[in-house]
């Protein structure tokens, strides 16, 4: 199906609930009032926290929320505008203005966390367990625990300011550079101009020659820009390394683990257990090579459709399938997902200057989120729709939380999204009687699992290795390609052939540039959900209230406490091994169908 005729081109979000447009005078009002309110906050509370009662400290938290909420909405608005048009100079100028102003306001408020962290045990003791601080108790305790990583107020302010023209600017350049890539590609005898997302979608083309030419062309553009991209990555990693050294973190990944309130040991266990199961990836792709009748399967072929599975879906067809899947699980989930369509909170078309990929963006608890898609009609786009709507449902269910507790930590943030994909797959498999279609569904599900679990684990391993290398000495493009090739071979073994262009794949992964060590969150979320979904199949209706409670908590308690509600022990390696057994059952099912 041509990407211009899916019906997605008509599906645009309406951001007027946030601001009326780029020229809305409220934008300047928000920035000015945010700064003035922050100055009043400083005048009232700076140097005074030790003498506050628990009730007065709760009032300070409420005041912080009233300052932050309008700025969160403004940040959401401008970033959504930028996502759909990364080439618009007016949007970029306003984005820079908002970031600069918000950074100034944030700098005024830096003292609060630092001062709380520096309180003596005696001064802090009156806040522990205080009823007035119940909504803030977890974050208060976490701030206290992590205070050892804080720098002085002046140092924190300098970091915020230098990042505007340092790491933030490097990330922006990477995103704008890669979003600007366009590709002349011949398909069906016609030369087409495609963006990166459209070209990568050709990995699902039935013709092996198209798949391999597409990916060779895609990565060639990154290789052509290796001078800039390699410099950006080295600079970002080195900057990150300097800062974690100043703060006293044990390892680069420790920053993300600390933010997520997860131990280095727990995440290392997750990495190790997933790496142990790379044999499942190897086993699956040998099966797929047989299904495709390929003598040699390359990395460009890993998402190739089965001969009987080259089906495309209009946007409306995908919407119907996804909503039916939610309805089969729970009426409330269905209603919440449907409201996202009815309230024009989804942007779906593929456009030249639009950012690639998909995401769900939420800002404050009193506003519903927005979903960003690049819908091309592929079967994976249907799963992506369910995935992002799962994020939206999660955000809506957490709407009773304070802003400080609203956004889930990254690993738990993937729970509802991946669970929603599984609900969709289960719904479709139950309806389907055709063996060939079932094979297609199982291969699609397994490939989604390997993409969002094992490949993310591989990316995380690359990050660990590349950060260690760069913090020792700057790495050349070839050095980084060599590190990445080693990880590829570790994951796929002898199940696929490694063509040279795939050594450059690391340079095309936005997360490793924009949010170091973000990617393990996908693997964490995946394996957590496999266990939860199996529990749902065993418990039925009694599972749903616990699951909704889990989602409603946002980040108001530790990950261990939140997952315990549904019976998960995330600190035990055997828990993760149990989750991996679910993947093996899917491979077994596929093998039986063959």
Image (cartoon, grey):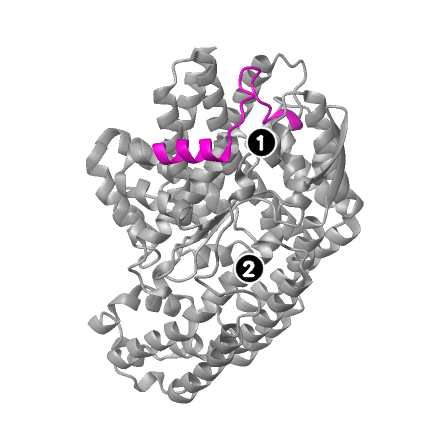
Drawn side of residue 356 relative to residue 526, left or right: right
Residue 584, position as x, y percentages in the image: 42, 24
Depicted 165 relative to depicted 401: above or below: below
User: Which contiguous range is marked in magenta?
Assistant: 300-324
Depicted 192 relative to depicted 250: above or below: above
Crowd band around label 1 with a 10 angstrom C-alpha radius: few (<14), some (14–19), many (20+)? many
Q: How far is mark 1 from mark 2, CA to CA?
A: 35 Å
Q: Nearer the viewer, residue 66 or 409?
A: 66
Q: Nearer the viewer, residue 360 or 134?
A: 360
The residue at the point 39 percent across, 18 percent down is 432
Residue 53 badge: none
Drawn side of residue 260 relative to residue 158, left or right: left
Residue 388, position as x, y percentages in the image: 45, 44
Residue 61: within the magenta? no
Q: Secondary structure at mark 2?
A: helix
Residue beneath label 2, please?
79
Residue 315: within the magenta? yes
Task: Locate residue 335: give its quadrant.
Answer: top left
Residue 476, position as x, y percentages in the image: 77, 49
Residue beneath label 1, please?
491
């Amino acid at each position: 199906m041509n990407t211009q005729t899916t019906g997605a081109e008509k599906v645009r979000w309406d951001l007027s609930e946030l601001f009326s447009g780029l020229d809305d005078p409220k934008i300047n009002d928000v920035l000015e009032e945010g700064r003035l309110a922050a100055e009043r906050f400083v005048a009232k509370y700076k140097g005074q926290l030790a003498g506050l009662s628990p009730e007065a400290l709760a009032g300070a938290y409420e005041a912080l929320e009233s300052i932050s909420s309008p700025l969160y909405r403004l940040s959401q608005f401008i970033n959504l505008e930028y996502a759909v048009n990364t080439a618009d100079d007016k949007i970029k100028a306003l984005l820079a203005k908002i970031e600069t102003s918000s950074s100034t306001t944030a700098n005024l408020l830096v003292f609060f966390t630092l001062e709380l962290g520096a309180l003596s045990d005696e001064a802090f003791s009156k806040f522990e367990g205080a009823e007035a601080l119940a909504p803030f108790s977890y974050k208060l305790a976490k701030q206290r625990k992590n205070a050892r990583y804080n720098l002085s107020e002046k140092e924190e302010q300098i970091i915020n300011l230098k990042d505007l023209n340092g790491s933030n600017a490097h990330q922006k350049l990477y995103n704008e550079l890669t979003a600007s890539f366009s590709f002349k590609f011949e398909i069906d005898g016609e030369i087409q101009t495609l963006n990166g997302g459209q070209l990568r979608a050709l990995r699902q083309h039935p013709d092996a020659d198209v798949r391999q030419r597409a990916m060779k062309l895609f990565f060639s553009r990154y290789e052509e820009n290796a001078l800039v991209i390699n410099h950006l990555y080295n600079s970002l990693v080195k900057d990150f390394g300097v800062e974690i050294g100043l703060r006293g973190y044990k390892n680069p990944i420790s920053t993300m683990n600390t933010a997520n309130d997860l131990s280095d040991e727990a995440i290392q266990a997750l990495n190790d257990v997933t790496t142990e199961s790379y044999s499942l990836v190897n086993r699956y792709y040998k099966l797929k090579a047989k299904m495709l009748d390929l003598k040699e399967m390359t990395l460009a072929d890993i998402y190739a459709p089965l001969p009987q599975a080259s089906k495309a879906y209009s946007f409306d067809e995908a919407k119907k399938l996804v909503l039916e899947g939610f309805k089969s699980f729970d009426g409330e989930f269905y209603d919440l997902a449907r409201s996202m369509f009815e309230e024009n909170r989804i942007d779906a078309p593929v456009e030249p200057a639009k950012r690639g990929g998909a995401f769900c963006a939420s800002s404050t608890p009193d506003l519903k989120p927005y979903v960003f898609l690049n819908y091309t009609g592929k079967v994976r786009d249907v799963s992506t729709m369910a995935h992002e709507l799962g994020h939206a449902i999660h955000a809506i269910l957490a709407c009773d939380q304070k802003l400080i507790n609203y956004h889930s930590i990254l690993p738990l943030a993937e729970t509802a999204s991946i669970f929603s994909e599984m609900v969709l797959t289960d719904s479709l498999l139950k309806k389907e009687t055709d063996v060939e279609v079932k094979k297609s569904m199982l291969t699609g599900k397994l490939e989604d699992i390997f993409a969002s679990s094992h490949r993310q684990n591989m990316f995380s391993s690359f990050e660990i290795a590349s950060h260690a290398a760069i913090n020792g000495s700057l790495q050349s493009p070839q050095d980084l390609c060599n590190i990445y090739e080693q990880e590829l071979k570790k994951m796929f073994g002898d199940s696929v052939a490694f063509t040279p262009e795939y050594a450059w794949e690391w340079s095309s992964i936005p997360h490793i540039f924009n949010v170091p060590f973000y990617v393990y969150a996908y693997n964490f979320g995946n394996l957590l959900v496999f266990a939860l979904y199996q529990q749902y199949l065993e418990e039925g209706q009694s599972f749903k209230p616990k699951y909704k409670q889990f989602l409603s908590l946002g980040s108001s308690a530790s990950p261990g406490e939140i997952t315990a509600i549904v019976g998960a022990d995330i600190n035990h390696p055997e828990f993760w091994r149990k989750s991996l057994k679910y993947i093996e059952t899917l491979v077994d099912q596929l093998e039986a169908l063959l």
